[in-house]
Amino acid sequence: MSRFSAGRAALIATATMLFVSSLTSAAVAHPDHQDEAPGKNVPVPESEAERQFALVSALELADMQASLESIGLTRCINGDAAGYACDGVDLISFVPLSTLGGGEGNDLWGWTHNKSGREFAIMGRTTGVTFVEITNPKNPKVIGTLPSHSFSSIWRDLKVYDDHVFIVSEAQQSGLQVFDLTELLSQKQIPHVFTETAHLPAWSNAHNIAVNADTGFAYVVGSNTCGGGLHMVNLNDPRAPVSAGCFSADGYTHDVQCVLYQGTDTDHVGSEICFASNEDTLTIVDVTNKATPVQLSRKPYAGVGYSHQGWLTENHRYFVSDDELDELNGAPKTKTYVWNLSDLDNPVVGFTFNGATGAIDHNQYIRDGRSYQANYKAGLRIVSLDDIASDSAGEVAYFDTFPQNNAAQFDGAWTAYPFYRANVVAVSTIDRGLFILGYEGEAGSVDVGDLENSSEPAFPNRWRARGVVEVHDESGQPVEGASVRVRWSNGKTRNCVTDALGRCEVKVLRGNRFNKVWFRVVDIESGSASYTSWLNRDADGDSNGFRDKVNRP
């Protein structure tokens, strides 16, 4: 019996008594809203019962986390991958919170270094953020952590711009943390505790941050400034961010996406437009002029519980949004709202669609006609938007990161980040850690079936390195006409196209003072087939299927 059992029993008994007596006077709080935020009639009580249950939950969470271990590549077979229910999504790797630095997990974003092609997951936790290299997603490496600027908080949000990550938190005195991500590239002693590159104390606490990479502006929302609305920040010098304006006309904003609008409403094409989830509405704001932002529309919708977050389709014709409380208010299944944006001054919900479970939806991001939804206890759900113009959408794949149940409760997946090369998806979870997942897609797949290398002398003081890549389809057959992108360790990028045997060659010159050079497969394109990098292999066993070394002759 655990040494905590007696204490737990007492806590549970006390908490249960308090909880029963308080049911008639308190609503159940949800974790994605700060108690002090100027919300719009959203009850966030803090009762003694909740505090007691929090203590119990913390003890249970600590025990569960201590039992978790890292997991390597596990294919989704017959609906299961290492004990997690799945369909069409493989478990590439799993890193438990105990390895990431402990505490609870929250938001997640990714970073790809353009020059080297190295890829990273950046995961928020209660005490800071953790940087994990997933260049080889089968072998994630924790590079280090960046502690919170001030205090711990279960709410932390972050976005990347110009090789820097920008971090906000609900913790008081947190402001805007800035960290130069290129520091990760040369760090030899890992895991390492990093220090922030810069800090902007323009607010104390904030709930969320969005970045428009096309303009170099960030939009901080849910802060103790600007009425909780859009606090605009100029990031054009990422080491010296500067406040640039406010929008407060509609009060508290929970989340937002801002873009240079390219949709069908010709009145606003080319303007910088923000699509804000404002607790009870979708609120659309023109922020082209940061000094005088203009509210274009403010629209409630039927069944609103808590307008939480959403994302534009790639053609900007639709905004796909989630409501964090409608499942608790009677919606039997996870409900997603699709807004028609043909008129930004009058957006309308064109249709809704229901998920496969009753779990609460949290965050979603859209890539290549798929919405990658992090739906708390139901985990990652991938929704096809191919027929969105016909008012139709539906789930095509999933990976359930919370194996116990799919209840409408606030635990499990927080964010799914789908913007890496290939079909790798990172998912942060509150309770367990970081999942690196692979979505094969429905149109077939290709991967590396073999890597070979050779070298030969070239003109004086030079030698030539050759790399050969063999591409296979999902059945192991060679693929002709696949376009392969390879990056050499000296920074050179080369492309080649496979022949009838599925093979193609890349070359690079090196000086005789260099004894070796590495090449790595960055991407493979072959029609509509997906590049399933996590299935890369090398029949000879002389490489890992991702990269190979060429020695000087």
Image: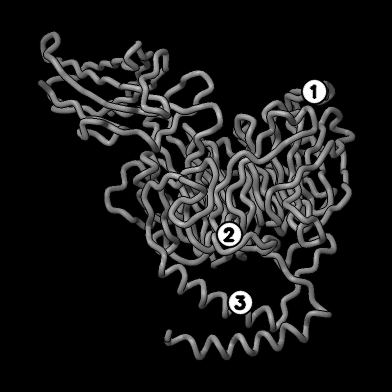
Mark carried by residue 412: 2
The answer to whether any part of residue 518 appears in the image is yes
Position of residue 195 relative to residue 389, above or below, is below
Observer-nearest of 254 and 395 = 395
Residue, disc 1: 264
Neighbourhood count class around disc 1 (C-alpha, 10 Å): few under 14, some 14–19, many 20 upward = some
First in sequence: mark 3 or mark 1?
Answer: 3
**Residue 387, percent across and down?**
73, 29
Kindly identify the residue that appears in the image at 20 percent across and 23 percent down: 453
Give 363 or 192, whichever is nearer the viewer: 363
User: How far across and down, in percent of the image, does residue 139 sit?
Assistant: 34, 46
Secondary structure state at the residue bearing disc 1: loop
CA neighbours of label 2 inside 10 A, class few (<14), some (14 to 19), many (20+): many
Up/down of 88 relative to 51, above or below: above
219 above or below 441? below
Mark 1 vs mark 2: which is more N-terminal? 1
Mark 1–mark 2 contact, CB under 8 Å? no
Determine which quarter of the picture holds residue 343.
Answer: top right
Task: Kindly identify the amino acid type of the residue bearing the numbered disc 1.
Answer: Thr
Quadrant location of the C terminus? Answer: top left
Q: Is residue 226 visible?
A: no
Front in this rendered view, residue 526 or 280:
526
Q: 160 and 174: which one is in front?
A: 160
Residue receiving disc 3: 54
